[in-house]
Amino acid sequence: MSGPPAALVRGKIMGKETFELIALVGRPAAGKSEVIDYLKKTPQEERVRRFHIGDFTEIDDFPYIWERFQDDDTLAALGMERMFTDEKYYFKDERIWDLFIAKIGRRAEEMRREDPSVFDRSTGILEFARGGKHAFRNAFSRLPDEVLRRLGVVYIEVSYEESCRKNRRRARPGLEGSILHHSLPDDKMEFYYRDNDWHELAPDRSGGFEVRGIRVPYAVLPNEPEVTDRPEALGPALEKVFGELWRLRKD
């Protein structure tokens, strides 16, 4: 039996000038949404040339999380038991984080089933934050092989203290469900996000880690001191990190 076409080996598309799938990850409020916003405002031709990203689709797990909160509020209003969270919106079962990642992976797979050439022409950007002793390692292990083979990871690096500061800064009363302005109380930041296993999974500034024998390339974007609030600094920083990730994907 012959193997897969050479153009698909390790998720590569020969001659393609844009990424297929990128995971944009980090602590809460690290700067992920600001990066997405910057990419949206960059003209497509420039975006391809500088960042290897043309048209792109976001797959963010925050709407899934927010929907669970809303579901429980609706259940409670109907006199029924809350299913996913307690009255303070702590999840009852920590395995629900696996559900959110699985939904991200399934959406990426659905996009490709609906249009097999979708990632030849555009990029899917998976966006999520995780905290815990094995949280990032576990999250990537929940993604399907076909997603992992096409994936490059950009980790936006900030300390826990900086994450908390920016989390408080972005809060806007009445906009708790907003991608740009959702925020967590300090006790939840402490409970869910003080621990972080990224540097155990990926100890260098760039490189690769393995999931089920699949090598996933990564590059780190330092964001402390902050660059995501200054477009004149963010553009060159993104050019550097995406350039390094592109080099790793092509190797």
Image (spheres, grey):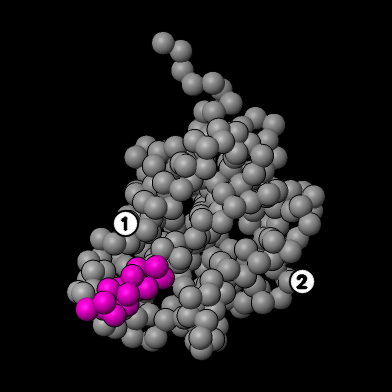
Is 51 rendered above or below residue 94? above
Is 12 rendered above or below residue 43? above
Q: Is residue 17 left or right of residue 119?
A: right
Pick the front one: 196 or 169: 169
Q: Amino acid at mark 2?
A: Glu
Farthest front residue in view: 78
Spatial CA distance of label 1 from label 2 is: 37 Å
Q: Residue at x 63, y 65 (%)?
A: 35
Find numbered disc 2 in the image and state the secondary structure of the residue it sits on.
Answer: helix
Pick the front one: 85 or 94: 85
Residue 132 in view in this figure: yes
Q: How many residues crowd mark 1 within 10 Å: few (<14), some (14–19), many (20+)?
A: some
Q: Residue at x 54, y 79 (%)?
A: 181
**Does label 1 or label 2 sit earlier along the sequence?**
1
Q: Residue at x 46, y 41 (%)?
A: 109
Marks 1, 2: nearer the viewer: 1
Q: Amino acid at mark 1?
A: Asp
Q: Quadrant of the C terminus?
A: top right
Residue that badge 1 annotates: 98
User: Which region shows up in magenta?
Assistant: 66-79
Residue that badge 2 annotates: 232
Farthest top residue in view: 1
